[in-house]
Amino acid sequence: MSALHGHRFVSNPAPRSPIAKGVLARPHSDRTTGKRADSDRHIKVLFVNSPNPEADKEITDRVEKVAKKRGVSMSVVATSWVRGKGCIPIVGCSTVERIEEAVQGLQFRLTEDEQKYLEEPYRAKPVSGY
């Protein structure tokens, strides 16, 4: 937090990858295939070779269930969850579809029960890449 001319400014955390490098944008069965899973070291460490693969699968499955139930994409659910934690997500906007999903994710709100449902299976991951 900083002060400028008597005004207070709050700095919110800015998650760099609110959809977990694309993992939360697709069903679990799709995440270990493709160029990104083969080439991205962080995906390999955090998801493909995860210390808690059951928890990871359950989280992705729950994001998919909430998305289907509410009629939105998984990306919208994941981005909304990040916003609900008071963070400002930094999202990739390389296509018109991603820009539209990012905007929808900012407007969409999860219920408190949905947030708890998504968080319940989470297990902390080891620090990677630093």
Image (cartoon, helix red, strand yellow):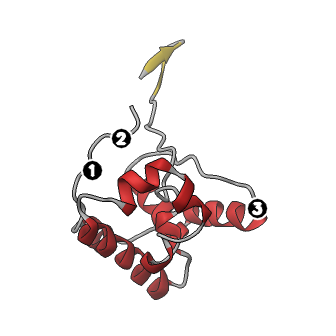
Circle 3 or circle 2, nearest the eye: 2
Task: Say which mark, if any, is on residue 95.
Answer: 3
**Residue 12 position within the rendered picture, expressed as x and y whole percent measured from the top left:** 44, 36
Circle 1 or circle 3, nearest the eye: 1
The answer for how far apart the CA atoms under marks 1 and 3 are is: 30 Å
Quadrant containing the C terminus is: top left
Nearer to the camera, 77 or 39: 39
Nearer to the camera, 8 or 88: 88
Q: Are marks 1 and 2 in contact (CB under 8 Å)?
A: yes
How many other residues sit within 10 Å of disc 2, few (<14), some (14-19) or many (≥20)? Answer: few
Q: Amino acid at mark 1?
A: Lys
How many other residues sit within 10 Å of disc 1, few (<14), some (14-19) or many (≥20)? Answer: few
Q: Amino acid at mark 3?
A: Thr
Task: Say which mark, if any, is on residue 125.
Answer: 1
Query: Which type of secondary structure does the marked residue at label 3 adopt?
Result: loop
The answer for how far apart the CA atoms under marks 3 and 2 are is: 28 Å
Q: Are marks 3 and 2 in contact (CB under 8 Å)?
A: no
Residue 95 in sight from this viewpoint: yes
Query: Which type of secondary structure does the marked residue at label 2 adopt?
Result: loop
Per the image, the residue denoted by label 2 is 128
